[in-house]
Amino acid sequence: MKQVMMSAALLSMCVPSLVLAQAETPRIDQRQANQEKRIDQGIASGQLNAHEATRLSNQQEHINNLEDKAKSDGVVTKKERARLRHAQDRTSGHIARQKHDRQQR
């Protein structure tokens, strides 16, 4: 009986950590940080004007909201990860396009 109780206690301690591990998104977080850095570099170099930077930052914020919503139930599914990756791909393309559009300051 004592062994069953110990096993149950150990299992109850492990299950929450498994749920939290599934909700972590280090690759998505790193890519978000990289894209935000690209926006900041574009502002500093003059490749992005204020309007473009604001629009790109709003897109980044939208992705952060999608990520928070995906994490809200404790698990980020493959479908949710694909949606986040697709949104990041689109924003990455927008950043590149806006940084290299040959506009004047």
Image (cartoon, rainbow, N blue to C red):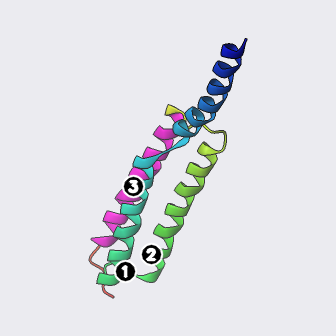
Q: In the image, what residue occupies the spot 37% across and 58% down?
A: 92
Q: Which residue is mark 3?
A: 30
Image location of residue 73, percent across then percent down: 66, 39
Which mark is on residue 53?
Answer: 2
Tell which residue pokes out farthest to the front in this image.
2
Of labels 2 and 3, the one closer to you = 3
Mark 1: amino acid: Ile
Q: Is residue 13 magenta?
A: no
Gap in angstroms between the C-alphas marked 1 and 3: 20 Å
Total number of numbered discs in the rendering: 3
Q: Secondary structure at mark 1?
A: helix
Gap in angstroms between the C-alphas marked 2 and 1: 7 Å
For label 1, count other residues whose C-alpha is less than 10 Å away and answer few (under 14), some (14-19) or many (20+). Answer: some
Image location of residue 71, percent across then percent down: 60, 44
Q: Quick one: 30 or 51, which is closer to the camera?
A: 30
Q: Secondary structure at mark 3?
A: helix
Image location of residue 58, percent across then percent down: 54, 67
State whether the magenta stretch is mostly helix, strand or loop: helix
Q: Which quarter of the figure is the C terminus placed in?
A: bottom left
Which quadrant of the structure image shows residue 29? bottom left
> Pointer 2 and pointer 1: residues touching (CB < 8 Å)?
yes
Q: Quick one: 86 or 15, which is closer to the camera?
A: 15
Which quadrant of the structure image shows residue 9? top right
Q: Which residue is mark 1?
A: 43
- 61 horizontally vs 27: left or right: right
For label 3, count other residues whose C-alpha is less than 10 Å away and answer few (under 14), some (14-19) or many (20+). Answer: few
- Of callouts 2 and 3, the N-terminal one: 3
Vertical arrangement, residue 49 with respect to residue 22, above or below: below
Gap in angstroms between the C-alphas marked 2 and 3: 20 Å
- Of callouts 1 and 3, the N-terminal one: 3
- 21 horizontally vs 15: left or right: left
Q: What is the span of residues highlighted in magenta in the rendered image?
A: 79-100
